[in-house]
Image (cartoon, rainbow, N blue to C red):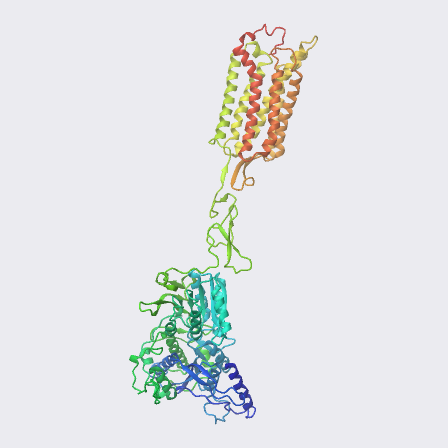
Amino acid sequence: MEHIFTLLHVVMAILNFSRTNGTFCSLQGEPVYPQLSKEGDIMVGAILPFHSGWEITDLSYSVRPPPVKCTSLDFRAFQFSQSLIYAIEEINNSSSLLPGVSLGYKIYDTCSSVAMGVREAMALVNGNENSDLNEPCTKPTQAQAIIGETYSSASIAIANSVGPLGVPMISHYSTCECLSDKRKYPTFLRTIPSDYYQSRALAEMVKHFGWTWVGAIRTDDAYGNSGMAAFTEAAKQLGICLEYSLAFYRTFSEEKVLRIIQQIKSSTSRVIVGFLDTWELEMLVHVLFEHNVTGYQWVGTEAWIINPALAKLDKYNILQGSIGLAIAKTTVTGIKDFILDINPLKSIGSGIFTEFWEALFQCTYTKPNESEDTPVCTGKEKLSGVENTFTDLSLMPIFSNVYKGIYAVAHTLHELLGCTQTCPTKKQPDPLTFLQHLKSVNFKTKDGEDVFFDKNGDPPAKYDIINWQTTKEHQYEFVTVGLYDSTLPSHNRLVVNVASVLWAQNSNQVPRSVCSESCPPGTRKAVQKGKPICCFDCIPCAEGEISNITDSIKCEQCHQDYWSNPHRDECVKKEIEFLSYEETMGILLTAVSIIGALTTIIIAIIFFKYKDTPIVKANNSELSFLLLFSLALCFLCSLTFIGQPSDWSCVLRHTAFGIIFVLCISCVLGKTIVVLMAFRATLPGSNVMKWFGPPQQRLSVLAFTLIQVLICVIWLATSPPFPFKNLKRYKEKIILECHLGSNVGFWAVLGYIGLLALFCFVLAFLARKLPDNFNEAKFITFSMLIFCAVWITFIPAYVSSPGKFTVAVEIFAILASSFGTLFCIFLPKCYIIILKPEKNTKKQMMGKVSVK
């Protein structure tokens, strides 16, 4: 409807312009007049919505549309106009600010119509209240600055109109973030914070209460759409998701409204952010009650959060527990009394005063019909018995905004006019010059409040956090429960006393409004396919990964020496595994090694005691003692495999093992050769023993051993064994082991031992049937058979055994082969020495060969 009205006026203006002389100014259309005015040396204009509605009686489109008929008087605009008049009167009476210069004012009524606001702005610029003017268009603007409009939609239209003309406009209540764009609105300033700050403050407050899944409803106009866009962007940055964002306007059809209601009822979020004007919210509250949409936590903007009229209309407690932002409380000394002193209005605005008086006191100046109960106005009614929107002064911060806007104009004029004790001139400054100085004005009010504008023409943002609470009399009261100050560091901006908040349905518990419950430590968030980021599943961290915070988006990998605990919320040091002396297996192997070494020593003692007996002398007693010595070392070298690996133990265990075992097998090989040579020597004409006597036997043992020593030296010189943390075999623990350094070196050592053992086995096998009661060949055969069986079995067991069991297998092979050699070669002799001494005689050795 309003767009049609505006279009008709534009068309008529174009038609009239085509019939006028372009050199002169000529009024197009009907003149408009201020509702309240007072002359002064320099004029200040104001555009306010004294009425909240309007209507056009003739829409036939056949004649010029008649003037709009304003309806529904809005007392708030009268409070704003009173604040403006108070500031101007105070300035005019001041001896320090603009001395000798009086400010006048013209206050227009837009009837909440954007088109009317634009027309009135043009009237303030051109002074075209008189339709008979025919002057050149070179005169200055009639108003130095324009105060208003109250609502963002009207301010946008007016700012677009006066911006190209350089006329400053200062709004006390228009918060749309879009108005901060100086490319589009270069002359617009305001004394109320931008929705840019309010949107971010709302988002921070929503986040503070843990609401990550919310719904949103906005007025379908510049204020609502721009504010909600800013809130959506801020919410996204803070990880808040909007389940829905719905537009609402008072002219929506019933079908559209029902769709909105259905969307709210079907939603899972329990918090609604309302970027709404009071009029839209009044209608919406009624509709919500009709459809039983209750129990939601509302978050409000400064447009409605401290509106007492809305609180009175909410009889069904739809908005109970609402929490939101209001302009920070401020005071202006003396303004309350001035606002409520309405008698001076009669002299400056007689046209609207009658309507105002009748609405204020619910009376009429015209004689009512007998059927009506409306009393007749006497003009002497007192405000003391009235309680309505006009007497409610809860919007004191907005009154202060009007006051500060007027004082910003006055301080700028004071500077431009060069005022000191008096002002040398009363000439109205050029609009563009005035605008530049107005943007940089900086002053303190009489109550100590700093007033200035930033580069976007906005003041610093400070808000009170207001909570709707119900009194015992079932009346709403607006309780301040916190504050928000954009000038502070980000972590200090928001302060809320949660304990003093009363939530929806009079609950003391903060409502929950999340799409998915928080993921505990030990899990990570995984967004559900096709849904916003606030809807997620909690996935447990994999082994070796942790998350130690709530709602972690990823799991962190533990350091290689650490592993995740069972709850996956902490990295703990991995268990370090090696074959130790303290564990059962280590104790058993140690005991067996010591027993083996002690057994060997005992046998050596027995042999030493009976060293002169034939059975000891047989087959070279010197090699027997050397063999016993090497076997004792074999048992003891297994101890180097037990305990935490170190540099010295890793080198010692493999080299000592290799050399000692070669020494042992070399002795066995020497004894085997001795047996063969001894019986070869009994043949007629044989002189073989002189070629393999004791010196040669010692030399052969030394030679075989030195070869192994050479192999070990080469191994240690090229790539020696070293302690190593094996992190690959087990994820959850560290295997401490000795890395071979060179696999070739290790298998060369084992291969050489195996080669000697095989050679010894073959020789012993050939000598097993020689006729000798004390022939060692068959015992050596058994010992080498056990030795080879053990070490052949060792290879696959060694390769496949995990962790410390690899070491245990190697120790077992050493002990088994050592015990096999010890028992097979020496146990039969000990049996004869101790239990069958009668066989240990020369008679038993008669005809046999004894080699010393």
Please say if 319 is above or below 591: below
Residue 349 shows up from this direction: yes
Residue 710 shows up from this direction: no
Q: Residue at x 46, y 31 (%)?
A: 582
Q: Residue at x 47, y 32 (%)?
A: 583
Residue 245 at what x, y percent from top left?
50, 67
Residue that protrudes farthest toward the front in the picture = 371
Residue 71 at what x, y percent from top left?
42, 83
Residue 722 at what x, y percent from top left?
55, 35
Please say if 439 is above or below 699: below
Nearest the eye: 324 or 755: 324
- Report which quarter residue 374 is drawn in: bottom left
Q: Quick one: quadrant of the C terminus?
A: top right
Residue that protrudes farthest toward the right in the picture = 685
Nearest the eye: 668 or 592: 592
Residue 835 shown left or right of residue 743 in the figure: left
Please say if 756 is above or below 57: above
Residue 715 at what x, y percent from top left?
60, 32
Tag count: 0
Nearest the eye: 417 or 183: 183
